[in-house]
Image: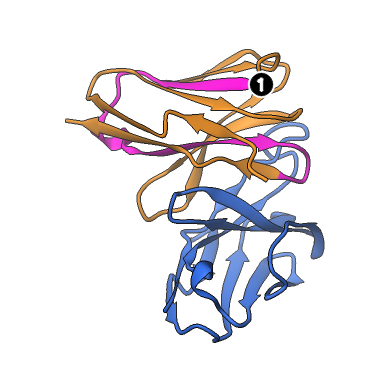
Amino acid sequence: SQQGEEDPQALSIQEGENATMNCSYKTSINNLQWYRQNSGRGLVHLILIRSNEREKHSGRLRVTLDTSKKSSSLLITASRAADTASYFCATDEGHDMRFGAGTRLTVKP
Amino acid sequence: DTAVSQTPKYLVTQMGNDKSIKCEQNLGHDTMYWYKQDSKKFLKIMFSYNNKELIINETVPNRFSPKSPDKAHLNLHINSLELGDSAVYFCASSLRGQGGPGANVLTFGAGSRLTVL
């Protein structure tokens, strides 16, 4: 069954703006991860945040996790046209990695 | 060097046929997966194998049969193909603990687009 659900489904911004995507999930998790998928390609791992962490940074990426609300957000700062892709959250429940339908981000030059 | 490779990349076939998709990883990972991505981009896990043993078998029709001859390979065979099987199938692999203690970070193949006519 689907676990992570991303919001919004699609997001269109101008280059230089920040992009925020949200993810909600239903069950207890070990960690939550964000992946990126360029059109016609496989998913690529971006960042992992553990269940006992609240915030994590990697370059222009900032991820937050609120286990009480079962939600996470991914912030991409100073977006670039090359950031155009679909972004998926995935919940790690042990042997099982569950993904949602993703947020389609379009960054206009 | 391609870390997770799937073949074929594209597959067009008629309803009722049987087809296979192959997957190989050269990362030394111990767990391999098959995911199905539908036209709405929703990614659904189908199977997971750890050290050649099936550990996840989601509710998929028994027309789908995974085969893992060794830890580096996980093939997907589909019998009696139906229109609804049209999708992109992704193979992935992971090594438990690679992303940190207890963490499971997946490496995906490029996908195999199956079109059933």
Judge whether B81 appears above or below B42 on screen. Answer: below
Q: Quadrant of residue A108?
A: top left
- For image coordinates 43% across by 70% down, the residue present is B9
Q: Could you tell me if residue A21 is visible in this image?
A: yes
- For image coordinates 62% across by 77% down, the residue present is B78
- For image coordinates 60% across by 67% down, the residue present is B24
For this rendering, which residue is in front, B72 or B87? B87
Left or right of B77 in this view: B38: left
Q: Quadrant of residue B116?
A: bottom left
Q: Could you tell me if residue B28 is visible in this image?
A: no
- Residue A29: percent from the left, percent from the top? 74, 29
- Residue A64: percent from the left, percent from the top? 56, 16
The residue indicated by pointer 1 is A70
Q: Residues within 10 Å of mark 1 (few under 14, many from 20)?
A: some
Q: Which residues are magenta?
A: A70-96
Quadrant (top left, top right, bottom left, bottom right) of the C terminus of chain B: bottom left
Write down the chain letter for disc 1.
A
For this rendering, which residue is in front, A64 or B115? B115
Q: Quadrant of residue A12?
A: top left
Shown in blue, the chain is B
- For image coordinates 35% across by 50% down, the residue present is A39
Q: How many marks?
A: 1
- In the rendered image of the structure, the colour used to display chain A is orange
Judge whether A14 appears above or below B8 on screen. Answer: above
For this rendering, which residue is in front, B83 or A27? B83
- Label 1, secondary structure: give it: loop
Instruction: Judge whether residue A75 is colored magenta.
Output: yes
